[in-house]
Amino acid sequence: MRPSGMLVRCLRRPIGVWPAVCVTVAVLAVTNVANHRWASPIEPVTAVAVSALLFGVLWWAGGTWAEAGLDPASWARGARWAGVLVGIVAVVYLAGALLPMTRDLFEDERYDRLTGAQVAWRVLVTVPFGTVLLEEVAFRGVLYGLLLRARGVVWATAVSSTLFGLWHVLPSLHLTAAKPALTPVFGDAPLGVVAAVLFTAAAGVLFCELRRRSGSLLAPMGLHWAVNALGYVAGFLLR
């Protein structure tokens, strides 16, 4: 038999949950390093491609749209949850921007070099496709779905959220330098990285719970987009 024929037969045969989890983690590790070293305007394109690859891993393990949190029957409910969550974040950010004691939290030196068009690109393209799509598909979609099948809700939430925290190690290396308001709290970079990992892991638990309660990946997607995208808008307007 030709090697190509053997490959096709292997791909047609479903793999187990744990091999699928290992493949998913390996793909995410490579993607994380690549994004950190070679971030570019095509990052949303690569994020979409990696998301499609991860869906392929889930299907290879016998998964379904429902297991990924994207059952069409759940879209309407998930969209309603997402809309409410976006509204809540908008109100919280508006209050934080208006109050003098919290306004400094929006200061970020990275905004000083951005134009209005660049902020719009991040809000409408980079955040939804380069960040939210990939991270939600990976951690609350594919990984959560696989682990839920294997070990249940607690394991799915704990493992996917821990990995979500570790995913933010490289992006948070210069966080305190970019956000001066965080320096008095976290001091040097190592402590800032640890804080970022713990915070994003806790956020991962919240996102998992939103997916579980809503039955849809659209709910955590909505909150994730709002926190990131509206943060860009608030920081840009208050610079």
Image (cartoon, rainbow, N blue to C red):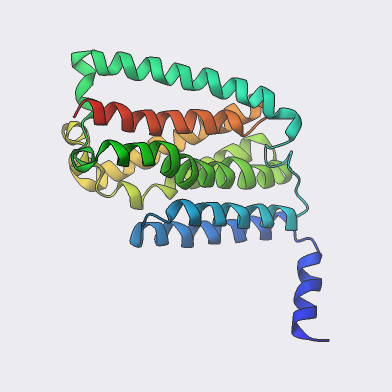
Q: Observer-nearest residue: 32 or 187?
A: 32
Q: Residue furthest bottom?
A: 1
**At x 54% / y 60%, what residue is drawn?**
27
Residue 215 location (% of width, % of height): 68, 28
Tell me if residue 185 can be seen. yes
Q: Position of residue 15 (x, y in %)?
A: 75, 61
138 and 149: which is toward the camera: 138
Quarter of the rendering occupied by the C terminus = top left
Q: Residue at x 34, y 30 (%)?
A: 231
Q: If the image is split into quadrants, where does the N terminus sit? A: bottom right
Indicate the quadrant where residue 131 lies.
Answer: top left
Does residue 159 appear in the picture of this structure?
Answer: no
Using the image as rendered, state which of residue 109 and residue 152 is in the foreground: 109
Relative placement, left or right, of 36 versus 61 is left
Give the x, y percent position of residue 19.
Answer: 67, 60
Residue 11 appears at what percent x and percent y? 76, 67
